[in-house]
């Protein structure tokens, strides 16, 4: 389950960003993951629940935005979403050489928390 190591890295990155910005408690973390990233949202939520028990993350919420796989056909300029069958063939012209323009994302969009002086 690589989601556990992914979440460990996410929390380390957020922790360092929080410390750098005088945030004592993180309230929310938002991730953006593409369907081609091979990261499973349910597994990430589980890993977050297990790993976020220390003081800085206690009570924090993990929000995950999933990005569909979007392709662009260079032959006809058709932009299309790849369905669950993972067919990367242009539905407009049947072109086989398509460019993936979305779906590989895996990043921390933002995090929110309380400053050390008690203000948000």
Image: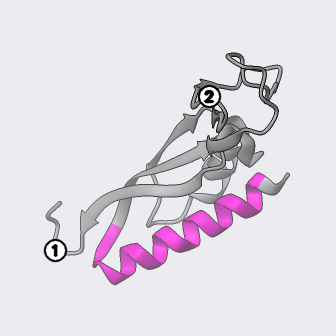
Residue 78, by quadrant, is top right
Question: In the displayed structure, would residue 24 be above or below residue 19?
Answer: above
- Tag 1 residue: 117
| x and y, in percent, of residue 97 in the image | 78, 39
Q: Is residue 109 placed above or below 21 in the rendered structure?
A: above
Give whichever of 72, 48 is nearer the camera.
72
Quadrant that contains the C terminus: bottom left
Q: Is residue 4 left or right of residue 63?
A: right
Q: How many dots with numbers?
A: 2
SS for dot 2 = loop
The reply to whether residue 39 is visible in this rendering is: no
In what element is the residue under mark 1? loop
Specify few, some or many for label 2: CA neighbours under 10 Å numbering under 14, 14-19, or 20 or more.
few
The residue labelled by disc 2 is 76
Q: Determine the residue positioned at 60% across, 50% down.
A: 105
**Residue 106 placement (x, y as % from top left):** 61, 54
The reply to whether the magenta stretch includes residue 81 is no
At label 1, counting other C-alpha atoms closer than 10 Å, the crowd grade (few under 14, some 14-19, many 20 or more) is few
Q: Nearer the viewer, residue 119 or 89?
A: 89
Return the disc, 2 or 1, that comes first in the chain's sequence.
Answer: 2
């Amino acid at each position: 389950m690589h989601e556990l190591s992914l979440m460990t890295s996410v929390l380390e990155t957020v922790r360092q960003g929080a410390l750098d910005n005088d945030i004592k408690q993180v309230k929310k973390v938002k991730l953006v993951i593409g369907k081609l990233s091979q990261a499973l949202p349910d597994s990430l939520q589980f890993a977050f629940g297990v790993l976020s028990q220390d003081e800085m993350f206690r009570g924090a919420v993990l929000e995950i935005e999933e990005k569909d796989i979007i392709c662009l056909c260079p032959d006809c300029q058709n932009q299309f979403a790849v369905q669950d069958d993972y067919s990367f063939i242009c539905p407009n012209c049947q072109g086989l050489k398509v460019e993936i323009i979305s779906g590989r994302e895996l990043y921390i969009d933002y995090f929110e928390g309380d400053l050390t002086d008690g203000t948000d």
